[in-house]
Amino acid sequence: YIYIYIYIYIYIYIYIYIYCFFLYDREGSECPELLLFKRWTDSLLFQHDYKVDKVKQLIVLQINDPKPAKMDMLLRRTAPIYIRARHNFFRCPRTWVMTLLVALFTLLLILVLNTRGYKGDISFIFFPDEDLTGAAQDSIELISYIRQLHVLSPTGGAYNLKNPRTKDPSQNGQGLLIANFFSHKKGGTFIEAGAYDGEDLSNTLYLEKELDWKGLLVEPDPWNFWSLRKKSRSVHAIQCCLSPFPYPREVTFRQSDTMGRIVAQEETKSKGIFTRVKCFPLYSLMKAQNLTVLDLLSLDVEGMEIQVLETLPWDKVSINAILIEVAHVSEGKSYVKSYMERKNYSLETEVGDDYLFVRK
């Protein structure tokens, strides 16, 4: 975003320079906008001096001819105002021509930035991934830091959904499937990682709206997270990714609608839009939100599902069901099954690209 700031700074500087250079009214031209305030303040000073002179006249008048009528007339008189009436905007060619040029320049700037961004032509300065303070995932300081500075409370108010009549917006009915598995349990808890915009493809919106479930939405993409917050979901949310290590990191993230993911250094040379994102361990988020006992964990982290699960201290958490997107897991679907078997989970059902595992 540094390029955008530079462009805006240059734009404002040029606008002010051009406006002052072309419109400054030195010799009483037809564009007095910039002198209006100065003339107004000058007139106030003139009024003050004029009234002081009138008071002096009153003193002399009172001595020579103290008649109330004349005194009242003098007190009510004011100094003449010499500010000219402001001309109509369109009668000053320089004003509207320069405004039109500035508007065209702004539109051109927006077009160039968007075109270059979507084509991936904006140069990207790569920063290596960083370990944040080297804190352990159960560190009290880290958990307090996440809770106080990163987790956002519900926005409040009514839902602001694009399709409010859609009962279950999940891709393949995952929301209803989970509700049926839990026998439409009221007041359950969940964490959904890869929450996208909080509505489209959401695995938890049905549970939240219809069954009053509470939990945490996790979305790393800043654009998607902004959209998510506008939906007015009644649960907490955090803009971060899940760390594939048992400690927090700051990484480079490739923004790509529903397919955003963490990337390596060599991938930043390809076309795309990249940003820096903080990644916190899943266990740290669970501790920060007091969700170590959880009904549902929904994982859609574009291929990092197993690495994220491997960071969990399984003896310190209790998760009844785990929904995993397996389409992008590099280890393969069979490995996901065997891994979850070792963690005492069995495959309940397959729905689309997702596997639903339940605790034995």
Image (cartoon, helix red, strand yellow):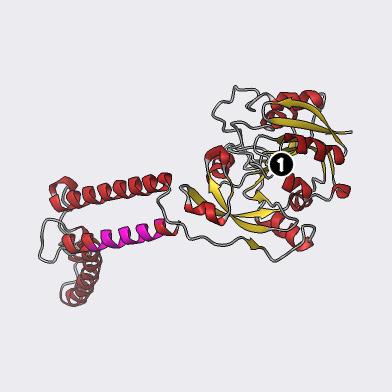
Q: Is residue 262 magenta?
A: no
Q: Residue at x 54, y 48 (%)?
A: 254
Q: Considering depth in this image, is 77 or 320 the residue closer to the camera?
A: 320
x and y, in percent, of residue 37 in the image: 25, 62
The quarter of the image holding the N terminus is bottom left
Please say if 359 is above or below 72. Answer: above
x and y, in percent, of residue 149 in the image: 66, 57
Is residue 298 visible in the rendered image? The answer is yes
Q: Considering depth in this image, is 260 or 133 the residue closer to the camera?
A: 260
Q: Considering depth in this image, is 304 or 170 the residue closer to the camera?
A: 304
Toward which corner of the image does residue 250 lie, by quadrant? bottom right
Q: Residue at x 41, y 45 (%)?
A: 119
Q: Would you call the spot at circle 1 few (<14 residues within 10 Å), some (14-19), or many (20 or more)?
A: few
Please say if 255 is above or below 78. Answer: above
Q: Residue at x 68, y 24 (%)?
A: 173
x and y, in percent, of residue 45 in the image: 24, 70
Query: Judging from the image, what secondary structure is the residue with disc 1 in?
Result: loop
**Magenta-highlighted residues:** 4-17
Q: Tally the marks.
A: 1
* Left or right: residue 71 compared with residue 329: left
Task: Name the main secondary structure of what is drawn in magenta.
Answer: helix
Q: Is residue 15 magenta?
A: yes
* Left or right: residue 282 compared with residue 196: right
Q: Disc 1 residue type?
A: Glu
Is residue 184 visible in the rendered image? The answer is no
Q: Considering depth in this image, is 163 or 319 the residue closer to the camera?
A: 319
x and y, in percent, of residue 339 in the image: 81, 40
* Left or right: residue 242 compared with residue 35: right
Please say if 253 is above or below 42. Answer: above
Residue at which label 1 appears = 331
